[in-house]
Image (tube, coloured by chain):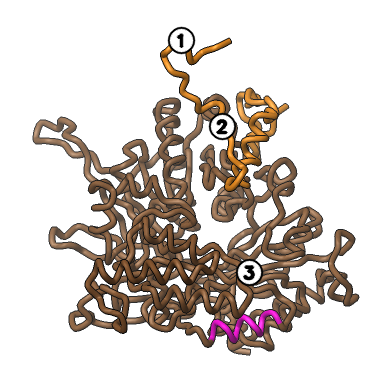
Chain colours: A orange, B brown
Amino acid sequence: MSNLLKGNFNTEKTVVDTNTSEESLEQRFEKEALKKLGGSIAFVAKKEVHWGDNDDSKKD
Amino acid sequence: MAKILFINPLVREEDDPRHVPYGIALLAAIAMRDGHQVQVYDENAWRKGADVREQVLNADHWDVIALGGITTAYGSIKTIVKHARATCPDTLIILGGGVLTSLPRDMMDFLPEVDVGVIGEAFVTLPEILSKIDAGQTDWENIDGIICRRTLADEQNSDTGSELVISGQRTLIPDLDSLPYPAWDLFPLEEVYFPNSQVLFSEEGMLAQRRLDINASYGCSLICRYCYHLGIAGDMKYEKDENNNIQIEFDKPGNYSRTIRYHSPEYIVGLVKHAYEKYNLDFIGFLDENLMTMDQYSKRTWLKEICRLWIENGMQPTCIHDGIEHDENCTGVHWSGTSHATLCNKETLEVMREAGCSHLIYGYESFSPHVMKTIGKGATPKTNMRSFFWTLESGIRPIPNQIIGFPNEDFQAIYDNMAAWEKLGIVVKPFFATPYPGSEWFTVYRDWIEEQYDGNLEKYILDLGDATRITAVISHNFNAVELLGLRELMMSFDYKRIGEYEQYWRNNHNIPEGEPSTIFKDPVDKSTVKKTTNIKLVGRIDTAAK
């Protein structure tokens, strides 16, 4: 049972943690790199990449 | 009894959640004390997103959804109240805290989903709202400390919209010791907060494993023009405008009021001991605005008595007791707080260290005499330096906060600061002077601030952070680009490049060498300012009388 809600009575419905995925390695890396940003620490935020419409930009 | 859901909004998203929201924890305890059914969803701690929030909102039939926070939580609050209104159309949504208190009418306009705003201290106002809910009443305007909406009707009794109504001013509670202990159990201590206990201000803070924060006092006797107290420090005034509408006002040039309140040492140490025994704490952060104000008002007895009781109750850290270096094996409770350059004294600092104080935050802000004269801090470069050495000598780390971008900041101030940092070994990335709502400089510069955000105040509120990033500029001499560049060069002590830029700046502003590098013109016409300062001590005067 999740304990996302804490109180002095039982709610009618239980809140289930649907966002259970552990931080991915990619997320962890980008978070840590952001803290040290500067100099040679630069990175691509992969979720923020806007792929061009040009098919040439999407190479499998 | 009312069924109430407290939601703690997201704040400082870029950092891990580190602080249990003290106000919500107290209000939850008060509501439970009065017999209400209470749940807390700490969105800032969990950071689970909209799906989980949807479940929370649907978990029960809530009579009240209550939110609060500081101004920088506004973006999250906006998202939550929209979601709450859509999911729980019949639930009363209440907003309180600094975000609402600083700009009650604006916030109610920005957030039409909010039914009732609590202006200032909610310790009595919220229970009165809950009592009305129990009684089936909705005449919120009969409760002090409220802003709410009154439905307007035409002669045919048709709904023609609503207007905002502000009720009478809520009196601050005189006896803080009447407050219950915060309901820490309703927050994810083991899951989130204890793992984020570390505070990188001292060795002891760095090694903290189980930290909680407490608020031992409310108020500050000083009138720092960038600071805000938001109605809990006697700083708030209800004034009628030309249309006879009540407006909420705070510090204005020459017009200041403060109420000083603090818990008894017995309450404070009792609370910490309760937390120590229940949660096995190793660190306490005092959230107080300025511990030294209280110490001064108690005639230097308050902190000494807290320290005496701290040791008497077995919470003196063993490393200090045994005179050895602190490590993970140390037991007892280390602690930290806030100090003030002029109000602290050597003897008290030594007593504090003996009881386990590891670091003290000093808002030194600047080491430039002409800047310090204008900021209302009641300190000088001399008192900054004196307190710095006293604190170090006592064994406590002083945390020397600095700010650049004050209205009259100029090149001389920049050189003064760099010289002091070099002399004192200060490693710092200064904050930017930021006019938060509720501060005197927000009132003075409001038009200019809005101008910088295309006349859109909400855009400014959404942009506000913790002042490490630049937002609205109130410096007369430097724009945002200049401040950012100067800060970078100051941190690397690059006198040469700053000097070269000064020549360029002087040419641009037609200010010859030898004259002060400033175009500052005080926006306040001092000849029209009527000075009124009213500082009173309320409540705990027993310590002061000893």
- In space, the residues marked 2 and 1 are separated at their CA atoms by 21 Å
Q: Do labels 2 and 1 share a chain?
A: yes
**x and y percent of residue B343 in the render?**
55, 84
Residue type (three-letter) at the residue carrying disc 3: Gly
Q: Mark 1 lies on which chain?
A: A
Q: Label 1: which residue?
A: A55
**Front in this rendered view, residue B45 or B385:** B385
Q: How crowded is mark 1: few (under 14 residues within 10 Å), some or many (20 or more)?
A: few
Residue type beneath disc 1: Asp
Q: Is residue B180 above or below residue B545?
A: above
- The kind of secondary structure element at disc 1 is helix
- Residue drawn at x 34%, y 62% as measured from the top left: B169
Going by the image, does B279 lie left or right of B536? right
Magenta: main secondary structure equals: helix
> In the rendered view of the protein, which quadrant contains the C terminus of chain B?
bottom right
Amino acid at the residue labelled 2: Val
Q: In this view, does B532 lie above or below B64?
A: below
Please name which of the two marks, 2 or 3, marks the residue nearer to the observer.
2
Q: Is residue B475 above or below residue B61?
A: below
Nearer the observer, A2 or B496: B496
Quadrant of the rendered structure where residue B93 is?
Answer: top left
The crowd level at tag 2 (other Cα within 10 Å; few <14, some 14-19, many 20+) is: few
Residue B26 lies, in percent from the top left, at 58, 54
Does B329 appear in magenta? no
Segment colored magenta: B383-392
Residue B537 at x, y percent in the picture: 48, 80
| Residue lying at 35% horizontally and 81% vertically, measured from the top left | B533
Q: What element carries label 3?
A: strand
Q: Does residue B262 appear in the picture of this structure?
A: no
Q: Mark 3 points at which residue?
A: B337
Give me the residue at 55% from left, 24% from top.
Answer: B51
